[in-house]
Image (tube, helix red, strand yellow):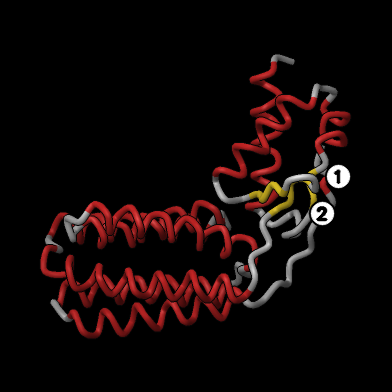
Amino acid sequence: MRKETVEQKVYHLIKNAILNRQMAPGNQLFESAIAEKVKASRTPIRSAITKLESEGLVNVIPNKGAFIVQPTIEEMVQAFEMRKNLEEMVIQKGFSHLGTEEINQLKQLLHEMKDAYNEREIVLYQEKNNAFHLVLAKASGNRYLVEFMEEILNRITIYMVLYDVFTEDNEERDLLEHEKMIKLIEAGDEEKLGALLFGHLESSLKKLQQDKVNYQSITTLF
Protein backbone atom coordinates (compact mmCIF):
# COMPACT_ATOMS: atom_id res chain seq x y z
CA MET A 1 0.00 0.00 0.00
CA ARG A 2 1.25 3.47 -0.83
CA LYS A 3 1.26 6.02 1.98
CA GLU A 4 -1.51 8.06 0.34
CA THR A 5 -3.69 4.98 0.05
CA VAL A 6 -3.21 4.00 3.68
CA GLU A 7 -3.84 7.55 4.90
CA GLN A 8 -7.02 7.88 2.84
CA LYS A 9 -8.28 4.47 3.90
CA VAL A 10 -7.77 5.16 7.60
CA TYR A 11 -9.15 8.71 7.31
CA HIS A 12 -12.37 7.60 5.60
CA LEU A 13 -12.80 4.55 7.80
CA ILE A 14 -12.53 6.49 11.05
CA LYS A 15 -14.53 9.46 9.77
CA ASN A 16 -17.37 7.26 8.53
CA ALA A 17 -17.38 5.35 11.81
CA ILE A 18 -17.64 8.61 13.76
CA LEU A 19 -20.26 10.23 11.54
CA ASN A 20 -22.35 7.08 11.42
CA ARG A 21 -22.16 6.91 15.21
CA GLN A 22 -20.46 3.51 15.32
CA MET A 23 -17.81 4.76 17.74
CA ALA A 24 -18.52 6.48 21.03
CA PRO A 25 -17.43 10.07 21.68
CA GLY A 26 -14.32 10.05 23.85
CA ASN A 27 -13.03 6.78 22.40
CA GLN A 28 -9.24 6.83 22.02
CA LEU A 29 -7.61 6.20 18.65
CA PHE A 30 -4.49 4.10 19.19
CA GLU A 31 -2.05 4.68 16.35
CA SER A 32 -0.14 1.47 17.03
CA ALA A 33 -3.28 -0.67 17.01
CA ILE A 34 -4.54 0.90 13.78
CA ALA A 35 -1.13 0.56 12.13
CA GLU A 36 -1.01 -3.12 13.08
CA LYS A 37 -4.49 -3.74 11.72
CA VAL A 38 -3.81 -2.14 8.33
CA LYS A 39 -0.19 -3.37 8.29
CA ALA A 40 1.35 0.04 7.76
CA SER A 41 3.67 2.46 9.52
CA ARG A 42 2.31 4.98 11.99
CA THR A 43 3.17 7.96 9.76
CA PRO A 44 0.10 7.77 7.47
CA ILE A 45 -2.06 6.92 10.49
CA ARG A 46 -0.86 10.08 12.22
CA SER A 47 -1.55 12.14 9.08
CA ALA A 48 -5.11 10.80 8.89
CA ILE A 49 -5.70 11.67 12.55
CA THR A 50 -4.29 15.17 12.02
CA LYS A 51 -6.75 15.71 9.18
CA LEU A 52 -9.63 14.53 11.36
CA GLU A 53 -8.48 16.92 14.08
CA SER A 54 -8.54 19.84 11.64
CA GLU A 55 -12.18 19.01 10.87
CA GLY A 56 -13.15 19.04 14.54
CA LEU A 57 -13.81 15.31 14.77
CA VAL A 58 -10.79 14.39 16.88
CA ASN A 59 -8.96 15.98 19.79
CA VAL A 60 -5.23 15.34 20.05
CA ILE A 61 -3.99 15.79 23.61
CA PRO A 62 -0.20 16.06 24.05
CA ASN A 63 1.33 13.07 25.87
CA LYS A 64 -2.05 11.34 25.98
CA GLY A 65 -3.19 10.62 22.45
CA ALA A 66 -6.04 11.19 20.01
CA PHE A 67 -9.66 10.99 21.11
CA ILE A 68 -12.99 11.29 19.31
CA VAL A 69 -14.55 14.60 20.26
CA GLN A 70 -16.81 14.43 23.28
CA PRO A 71 -18.55 17.79 23.64
CA THR A 72 -20.22 18.57 26.93
CA ILE A 73 -23.83 19.67 27.13
CA GLU A 74 -22.57 23.13 28.09
CA GLU A 75 -20.43 23.31 24.94
CA MET A 76 -23.39 22.30 22.82
CA VAL A 77 -25.60 24.88 24.51
CA GLN A 78 -22.98 27.55 23.84
CA ALA A 79 -22.78 26.52 20.18
CA PHE A 80 -26.55 26.79 19.79
CA GLU A 81 -26.61 30.15 21.58
CA MET A 82 -24.03 31.44 19.12
CA ARG A 83 -25.99 30.04 16.21
CA LYS A 84 -29.20 31.69 17.44
CA ASN A 85 -27.42 35.06 17.52
CA LEU A 86 -26.04 34.51 14.03
CA GLU A 87 -29.42 33.37 12.69
CA GLU A 88 -30.97 36.54 14.09
CA MET A 89 -28.45 38.60 12.12
CA VAL A 90 -29.08 36.46 9.04
CA ILE A 91 -32.79 37.27 9.14
CA GLN A 92 -32.20 40.95 9.84
CA LYS A 93 -29.64 41.37 7.05
CA GLY A 94 -30.80 38.84 4.49
CA PHE A 95 -34.56 38.43 4.63
CA SER A 96 -35.35 41.40 2.38
CA HIS A 97 -32.91 40.06 -0.24
CA LEU A 98 -34.52 36.64 -0.54
CA GLY A 99 -36.01 36.36 -4.02
CA THR A 100 -37.23 33.75 -6.47
CA GLU A 101 -33.76 32.33 -7.04
CA GLU A 102 -33.13 31.78 -3.34
CA ILE A 103 -36.59 30.30 -2.80
CA ASN A 104 -36.00 27.84 -5.64
CA GLN A 105 -32.68 26.87 -4.06
CA LEU A 106 -34.38 26.26 -0.72
CA LYS A 107 -37.06 24.11 -2.34
CA GLN A 108 -34.43 22.04 -4.15
CA LEU A 109 -32.42 21.54 -0.96
CA LEU A 110 -35.55 20.54 0.93
CA HIS A 111 -36.27 17.96 -1.79
CA GLU A 112 -32.72 16.60 -1.35
CA MET A 113 -33.18 16.53 2.42
CA LYS A 114 -36.30 14.41 1.96
CA ASP A 115 -34.40 12.01 -0.31
CA ALA A 116 -31.61 11.70 2.25
CA TYR A 117 -34.18 11.09 4.97
CA ASN A 118 -35.88 8.36 2.95
CA GLU A 119 -32.50 6.69 2.38
CA ARG A 120 -31.62 7.11 6.10
CA GLU A 121 -28.46 9.01 5.15
CA ILE A 122 -28.02 11.14 8.26
CA VAL A 123 -24.70 12.69 7.20
CA LEU A 124 -26.04 13.73 3.78
CA TYR A 125 -29.21 14.98 5.47
CA GLN A 126 -27.19 17.26 7.74
CA GLU A 127 -25.11 18.53 4.80
CA LYS A 128 -28.24 19.54 2.89
CA ASN A 129 -29.70 21.09 6.02
CA ASN A 130 -26.57 23.25 6.40
CA ALA A 131 -26.74 24.30 2.77
CA PHE A 132 -30.40 25.29 3.32
CA HIS A 133 -29.50 27.68 6.14
CA LEU A 134 -26.49 29.05 4.27
CA VAL A 135 -28.78 30.19 1.45
CA LEU A 136 -30.33 32.57 3.96
CA ALA A 137 -26.93 33.71 5.21
CA LYS A 138 -25.59 34.35 1.72
CA ALA A 139 -28.57 36.56 0.96
CA SER A 140 -27.19 39.00 3.56
CA GLY A 141 -24.21 39.76 1.34
CA ASN A 142 -21.96 39.74 4.42
CA ARG A 143 -19.12 37.30 3.82
CA TYR A 144 -18.07 37.28 7.46
CA LEU A 145 -21.56 36.34 8.54
CA VAL A 146 -21.53 33.54 5.97
CA GLU A 147 -18.13 32.29 7.21
CA PHE A 148 -19.18 32.31 10.86
CA MET A 149 -22.47 30.61 10.03
CA GLU A 150 -20.70 27.91 8.05
CA GLU A 151 -18.26 27.30 10.91
CA ILE A 152 -20.96 27.01 13.57
CA LEU A 153 -23.16 24.87 11.31
CA ASN A 154 -20.29 22.45 10.71
CA ARG A 155 -19.56 22.30 14.43
CA ILE A 156 -23.20 21.66 15.32
CA THR A 157 -23.43 19.04 12.58
CA ILE A 158 -20.74 17.04 14.38
CA TYR A 159 -22.71 17.30 17.60
CA MET A 160 -25.95 16.31 15.89
CA VAL A 161 -24.36 13.32 14.18
CA LEU A 162 -22.62 12.14 17.35
CA TYR A 163 -25.63 12.43 19.64
CA ASP A 164 -28.80 12.80 17.60
CA VAL A 165 -31.26 9.96 17.24
CA PHE A 166 -32.36 9.70 13.59
CA THR A 167 -35.98 8.81 14.23
CA GLU A 168 -39.05 9.13 12.08
CA ASP A 169 -40.80 11.59 14.39
CA ASN A 170 -37.78 13.87 14.80
CA GLU A 171 -36.86 14.15 11.15
CA GLU A 172 -40.41 14.40 9.80
CA ARG A 173 -41.01 17.30 12.18
CA ASP A 174 -37.75 18.84 11.03
CA LEU A 175 -38.77 18.57 7.37
CA LEU A 176 -42.18 20.11 8.07
CA GLU A 177 -40.54 23.05 9.82
CA HIS A 178 -38.30 23.65 6.80
CA GLU A 179 -41.36 23.62 4.56
CA LYS A 180 -42.97 26.22 6.83
CA MET A 181 -39.83 28.37 6.62
CA ILE A 182 -40.09 28.47 2.85
CA LYS A 183 -43.79 29.38 3.01
CA LEU A 184 -43.08 32.20 5.47
CA ILE A 185 -40.35 33.54 3.21
CA GLU A 186 -42.74 33.45 0.25
CA ALA A 187 -45.34 35.26 2.39
CA GLY A 188 -42.81 37.89 3.45
CA ASP A 189 -43.41 37.19 7.15
CA GLU A 190 -40.03 37.95 8.75
CA GLU A 191 -41.30 37.90 12.34
CA LYS A 192 -42.90 34.45 12.16
CA LEU A 193 -39.86 33.08 10.36
CA GLY A 194 -37.64 34.17 13.23
CA ALA A 195 -39.97 32.63 15.82
CA LEU A 196 -40.15 29.36 13.89
CA LEU A 197 -36.40 29.21 13.40
CA PHE A 198 -35.58 29.81 17.06
CA GLY A 199 -38.14 27.18 18.10
CA HIS A 200 -36.54 24.83 15.59
CA LEU A 201 -33.12 25.35 17.21
CA GLU A 202 -34.49 24.76 20.70
CA SER A 203 -35.99 21.48 19.53
CA SER A 204 -32.67 20.42 17.98
CA LEU A 205 -30.81 21.21 21.20
CA LYS A 206 -33.14 19.00 23.22
CA LYS A 207 -32.49 16.13 20.82
CA LEU A 208 -28.75 16.52 21.34
CA GLN A 209 -29.11 15.63 25.00
CA GLN A 210 -30.07 12.07 24.15
CA ASP A 211 -27.61 9.28 23.38
CA LYS A 212 -29.31 5.99 22.54
CA VAL A 213 -26.83 4.63 20.01
CA ASN A 214 -24.85 1.39 20.27
CA TYR A 215 -21.20 2.07 19.53
CA GLN A 216 -18.43 -0.23 18.38
CA SER A 217 -14.83 -0.57 19.46
CA ILE A 218 -12.27 0.69 16.97
CA THR A 219 -10.70 -2.79 16.79
CA THR A 220 -13.84 -4.14 15.10
CA LEU A 221 -13.70 -1.61 12.28
CA PHE A 222 -10.48 -2.70 10.53
Residue 206, by quadrant, is bottom right
Other residues around mark 2 within 10 Å, as few (<14) / some (14–19) / many (≥20): some
Residue 111, numbered label: none
- Tags 1 and 2 in contact by the CB under 8 Å rule? yes
**Residue 102 image position (x, y, % from top left):** 19, 57
SS state under label 2: loop
View extreme (top): residue: 2
* Amino acid on which disc 1 is placed: Thr
* Amino acid on which disc 2 is placed: Gln
Q: Is residue 72 left or right of residue 203?
A: right
Q: For mark 1, what is the residue? A: 220
Dividing the image into 4 quarters, which one contains the C terminus?
Answer: top right
Q: For mark 2, what is the residue? A: 216
- The relative height of residue 152 versus residue 211 in the rendered view (above or below) is above
SS state under label 1: helix
Which residue is depicted at the point 83% across and 41% down?
30
